Amino acid sequence: MSQFLSDNAAAVHPRVWDAMRAADEADAPYDNDALSQRLDEAFGAIFGYEVAVLWAATGTAANCLALATMCPPHGGVVCHREAHIEVDEAGAPGFYLHGAKLLLAEGEGAKLTPDAVRAVIDPIRDDVHQVQPHAVSVTQASEYGQSYRPAELAALGALARERSLGFHVDGARFGNAVAFLGCSPAEAAGPCDALSFGMVKNGAMSAEAIVFRDADAAALARYRRKRAGHLQSKGRFLAAQLLAMLEGDLWLANARAANAAAAEIAGACGDRLMHPVEANELFVRLSAVEREVLRAQGFGFYDWGADAARFVTAWNTRDGDARALASAIANL
Amino acid sequence: MSQFLSDNAAAVHPRVWDAMRAADEADAPYDNDALSQRLDEAFGAIFGYEVAVLWAATGTAANCLALATMCPPHGGVVCHREAHIEVDEAGAPGFYLHGAKLLLAEGEGAKLTPDAVRAVIDPIRDDVHQVQPHAVSVTQASEYGQSYRPAELAALGALARERSLGFHVDGARFGNAVAFLGCSPAEAAGPCDALSFGMVKNGAMSAEAIVFRDADAAALARYRRKRAGHLQSKGRFLAAQLLAMLEGDLWLANARAANAAAAEIAGACGDRLMHPVEANELFVRLSAVEREVLRAQGFGFYDWGADAARFVTAWNTRDGDARALASAIANL
Amino acid sequence: MSQFLSDNAAAVHPRVWDAMRAADEADAPYDNDALSQRLDEAFGAIFGYEVAVLWAATGTAANCLALATMCPPHGGVVCHREAHIEVDEAGAPGFYLHGAKLLLAEGEGAKLTPDAVRAVIDPIRDDVHQVQPHAVSVTQASEYGQSYRPAELAALGALARERSLGFHVDGARFGNAVAFLGCSPAEAAGPCDALSFGMVKNGAMSAEAIVFRDADAAALARYRRKRAGHLQSKGRFLAAQLLAMLEGDLWLANARAANAAAAEIAGACGDRLMHPVEANELFVRLSAVEREVLRAQGFGFYDWGADAARFVTAWNTRDGDARALASAIANL
Amino acid sequence: MSQFLSDNAAAVHPRVWDAMRAADEADAPYDNDALSQRLDEAFGAIFGYEVAVLWAATGTAANCLALATMCPPHGGVVCHREAHIEVDEAGAPGFYLHGAKLLLAEGEGAKLTPDAVRAVIDPIRDDVHQVQPHAVSVTQASEYGQSYRPAELAALGALARERSLGFHVDGARFGNAVAFLGCSPAEAAGPCDALSFGMVKNGAMSAEAIVFRDADAAALARYRRKRAGHLQSKGRFLAAQLLAMLEGDLWLANARAANAAAAEIAGACGDRLMHPVEANELFVRLSAVEREVLRAQGFGFYDWGADAARFVTAWNTRDGDARALASAIANL
């Protein structure tokens, strides 16, 4: 019944399990183990530039540890009004950034544009009475499953650079964006300073990667991670998950599988779709009665307001389930 | 070579692995899954009173989430000068408690006594210029492997109640204390408001339990846990670890094994012991040359100042290793 | 040239000066002096119920110290999108409330209504992922010079009570609201838990009053005030200002004078007024050319967007100045 | 009766009053007024180098705003165990520095030495588990009225520079130190990055100066000052106080007067003195009976533990009072 509720509680991929088991034997604690030490190189290889990588158990921690390197306690971070960091992280940015403020921008499909960012920051008086912007955060793919094109990220990055703003990408579903865009990870991350590269929704158990361009920022984040209680002593098990996800591009294969299932369902939705499907989430106009009909057939999903539903596919969504849902929607 | 460095990176117990694997199938996210829902009852059964239990990935998070329910940002927490929360948590209490202060007490073997607590709090003027105490935190077993007797905890608890202080027990090695004391978990926890029941050092992978007496405090901690990025979406894997540790008292068996190994080594140390061995840690007077001799034989451990070493045994310390170390020390 | 820029830098009333000079002789420090000790009774007399009163040097400090008694670090405070605490206090609420969030509501004239508050809080899911509301803050008179009627405050207070929310009134221009409404201070404060009773804009130099209904909240605020560096050692000079303002209802006379000046100008504005004038602020539609004309005649004021200006009168605005401005606007 | 309790509530110097009255006419708000704009130059003139100066109403605010420019939330500030910031500021550093930690050093007379600082920072492991030092703070004159010699400050400054630590001087009684040392203000401040130059205890009403060497640090502190509610809208009255104190070296004359009174009393104390008198504070061994005798003669002062008393002179201590106390002590 829960198969389209979310990807965030899906099973763990067998290769991730295997890698964790293989890491069982004691190694140095925290991130001093051999696996954690390999992360920079392993992620560097897929991005094509040098990076410094930290693991963290959740996307919320990853996002906040990244943002804390960009914005002082008295500053602000521009994000979309419906960004996960604003809506669904319990005020974690306020905690990790010590009271810094999220400055909320508008934008179709929960995506920011340079104009939307400027609409927020241009009216801010450059004086001590108003919170000054220090960073921009976007979500790739967005909270509505929209993927930023490389050119869109480049434009946002250019604006950030011009205004001396840090640039953060919340990549809770980064793999799904890359899979949809068909571009390189570097293109899908754009010119960001830090990327929260989500793995948990995509086959891992409890490990996200924070990918920093700047080693100094990563060094700072290491202090903050420990201070936040996120430096696990058996950190090798988190590193093992990340490395397993990178190995043979498992992250990309899993994301493609989830996207394909979403595309299959999308094909049956027609005008019902509220947003184009550019990742593994579908927002579908469905009346209460229609939702009832679907649930009666065993499909699990969340209501999205009064007249719609959200369906999320995962790396392990079964072909049959996706097909069955597509057909059930088509038959409504 | 690392076998006596610490218990904090030891292998995961096979029954914990099994329980995690058994939890693979998707369930409700966060702590809405069936396993997380069983924690209150399962821990209540071993304590003999009602408790509300949260999982957290690290002891630092567990300690700080517990303390944050007891002490406001402008307050203070009395702890030992060598308490882990003071020395080794990177200022996490200052972060989680929003600037609250640790008020440092003295005490043999890193243990607090009512007198030591009074020596800290009695001189504090009851005015707005000085940080007022709001809680006491002790470590069971202490940072020097000393176990509080039930009567000692009762006395501290009585003082805490008398002064309206919250009472927290950092039980990173709680199992080892219970195993040493031969008393019930409830006796070893004393009249505390919250216990960080450590499992990671004792056979789990990444799950500690925060055991609250008061359901309201636990409810508060749930908000703070999410806000700290510690609410994992696949939380069922943390609950699975905790339940596996409780099942058949695995936590106690593991702690006994670690303690037995420590006792075997202790038997060879005689006057070299800086502290009686009441858990699984040994602090042993050893000259630099002697330490060199031991290391040359393949033993791994940390120096403890200039003239001593710390040895820690774990649930899976091999009999042969403990015997070999005991004999090597005896032969020095 | 600066006469209509703001009331926030106006001269100090002679009776306030006199009271300060009379307080010169040393007395007990902080708020232990005889004058500070009289505040509760003096304010209680004008409100008609028991209150506990703290002085603070600024409205920002007063607002934040009040709010910090109502909202925990993980909570939220509902306020208007254009509230001073949101727009012009440099993120001070995030600082004093340790990362708590302002939840922004809409409303004509920067005023909240129960419906506007419900529109913010009703969609908040009652779970740990979303910041829960803990307080409501309104500004009396509002940032657009609008005064809440007693019935409006009663309705907001009823909602706050129903939802267990604290209720704060930012009374930076509270005197002006009372003067406009012609009601009692208690009616103009409504059923609030704490009022920031502004005096600085109304003839004092550097003293605002935080008026608490609940003595426990005031006691908490005393710790927070010291911790924020706002407990001045020569606090008697702040108490002296407040008492002088209360003496013979100087605060009310001053506010009436400012309001009268504003009313005189308003009479000349006709349709140019963006908001009815219910205090001492005027928001007047004026083209860039018109503003230029006024400035050329020596009038000082702030632009308000591209097509308007803000004029603020003060307790000491000269009749002639107000008349001259009215006539200049009429002649445009 | 209160004449030797403290200098912190003494009367305001007539020239300070005059300067405040002269500033009555409205000027630009906050620190945009003509007087505030003169501070950098006026303080620069007495220090002999360029400085950037902010006013703040209290020493606690001044200290914390200064320290917040030197130490991140996860860092530590080395100070003496009996430093005012540790003992008497209600945890304000933890608030302003967002949980940063005070690292406590020992030292005769509440003074730090390079050795004492090293004894604190050298044992700190350079890893993420321990709070790393980022600044040193000393009090000039110290909490026991001891004045650092220029060479002592130079040595501390050299250590700070060597270890990349910021260097802060809490100069609550800076004038008294300069007066005692007979050196220049620059020598008495040493190579510090920021000095809290106290004026309130020395004849002002409610204005301290934060003197920064680095304009960028001052710019940062301006945001933090506003965010802390310390940016008063009628800031010209604080600037007026500071300028009046500088004018004709009033600060120095006042400090000399206070020191002279202390010296007169010290002359009668002989072996009773617990510390040499190097400013305007005396710590005098006096039995409970002796203290009773003095109080019966009308002298006001604080007990200092069970067997001593603290006497503080002020800029306006009357010759007769000092002589009378000296003679009363001599006659015990």
Image: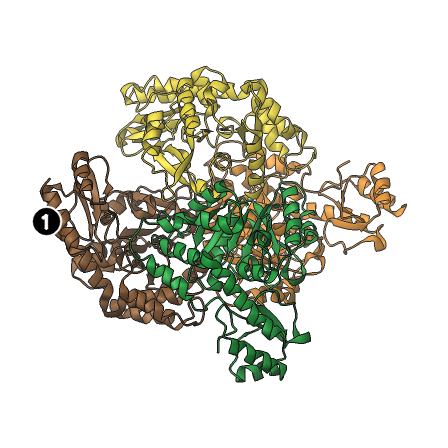
Chain colours: A yellow, B orange, C brown, D green
Task: Give the quadrant of residue D23.
Answer: bottom left
Q: Nearer the viewer, residue C55 or B213?
A: C55
* Relative horizontal placement of residue D153, taking residue D44 as reference (left or right): right
Residue D294: x and y in percent read: 56, 82
Q: Amino acid type of disc 1?
A: Gly
Q: Classify C106 as above or below D268.
A: above
Q: Classify D41 as above or below A61.
A: below
Residue C129: x and y in percent read: 41, 41
Q: Nearer the viewer, residue B96 or B225?
A: B96
Q: Nearer the viewer, residue D270 or D219?
A: D270
Q: Classify D303 as above or below C281.
A: below
Circle 1: element type: loop
Residue A129: x and y in percent read: 36, 44
Q: Nearer the viewer, residue D174 or A309?
A: D174
Quarter of the rendering occupied by the C terminus of chain C: top left
Q: How many marks?
A: 1
The 10 Å Cα crowd at callout 1, few under 14, some 14 to 19, many 20 or more, is some
Residue C234: x and y in percent read: 42, 65
* Residue at image mark 1: C267
